[in-house]
Amino acid sequence: MINRQLETIARKLFTKYPILSITGPRQSGKTTLLKYMFPELPYISLENTDERLFAINDPKGFLSNYPNGAILDEVQQTPELFSYIQTIVDEKNKTGMFVLSGSQNFMLLEKITQSLAGRVAILKLLPLSTIELRNANINIDNFYKLIFTGFYPAIYSREIESKYFYQNYIQTYIERDVRTLKNIGDLNNFTKFLQLCAGRTGQILNYSSLANDCDISVNTAKAWLSVLESSYIIFLLQPHYKNFNKRLIKMPKLYFYDTGLVASLLKINDDEQLKTHYLFGNLFENFIISEFQKYYYNSGLMSSIYFWRDNKGQEIDLIIENAEKLIPIEIKSSKTFSLDYFKNVKYYNNLSGNRTENSYVVYGSDKNYNSTEGKFISWKNLHDLFKIIL
């Protein structure tokens, strides 16, 4: 098993709360991690038809088999259990009883909010981070290969070629999760929608354009995007609204949690094709921003990242909100550095009063450099940036 950063905070919080909830995309490693962490707890998958029907038809009887708690996987499929779990943990009044896991964020959090508020610690497990790969002694020197291969654990632990993994992943996702989350009649059209989203990676989200290209209504496009968000396929990076007497863009940008999935959807067959692909810059940006998401979630924290753009097209790829500071970060895939990369950062600093020592460019080189305009941070050394700003 590849050790996961989330383990430390998960163990700590399970000693403070009666219930621990871990959500994340399918095959991000939730089951493997939970079985490893809590071998003393019975593991029940509620995707198993017999277990699920038992839990639905006789929730009290089902839970009576686990008086000391259990790991309940894909528990969002059995909402009947939640009120009974609440009663059990309130009566027992002890920590470390139940672990609730699932791959459908909205459905699980909705049930937790309704029945278990205040009793549960909520964490998210995304695919592997570069820090986790490095700690497992997996070579991460080639970012083209990393972006193409993606970060799902099975690709590395079972040595599955990424092109086969993602082909099957997409098929399984659409057949299982999409049918469960939304009554979508034409799954082929949803697949086309997913591919159209991949082609918009790192771009301002235009609902009308996306809907028109897929021949669906804007409301349907918004509903389908919610499906992709709730099952951890995409996330929408929100703009930072702080007004420096400028008109700001208020639409989000679209990113995927995993770049390997995007490469598969774009029909990129190997990392050599990636190098010359017209969306490579967007994919590199997606890669870096998703690493920030992973670091926040692996630390048990809510994400605090944004982008900034005014109506004249001046843009900062990433804004970190840290206490009262707003830290601008530009992202460049180039392996050579140029002070021109700080042009938008300088513009932002003049508006915001940010200082050059809090200004950064993450780029494709192997080395960090200090400059008169700010700091160049290698994509390999994101952990240096995490330590400074988080």
Image (spheres, grey):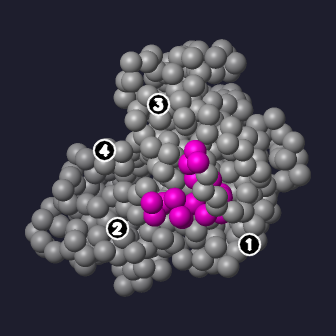
Instruction: Tell me if residue 334 comes above or below residue 344 in the rendering.
Output: below
Badge 2 density bin: few <14, some 14–19, many ≥20, Cα 10 Å: many
Q: Earlier in the sequence, mark 4 or mark 2?
A: 2
Give x and y (percent) for residue 78: 36, 53
Q: Earlier in the sequence, mark 1 or mark 3?
A: 1
- Helix, strand or loop for disc 1: loop
Q: How far apart are marks 3 and 2 (CA)?
A: 48 Å
Q: How far apart are marks 4 and 3 (CA)?
A: 17 Å
Residue 139, which numbered label?
1
Residue with the mark numbered 3: 350
- Helix, strand or loop for disc 3: helix
Residue under the point 58% across and 44% down:
373
Q: Which amino acid does label 4 sit on?
A: Glu
Q: Which of marks 4 and 3 is in front?
A: 3
Residue with the mark numbered 2: 99
Q: Nearer the viewer, mark 1 or mark 3?
A: 3
Magenta residues span 372-388
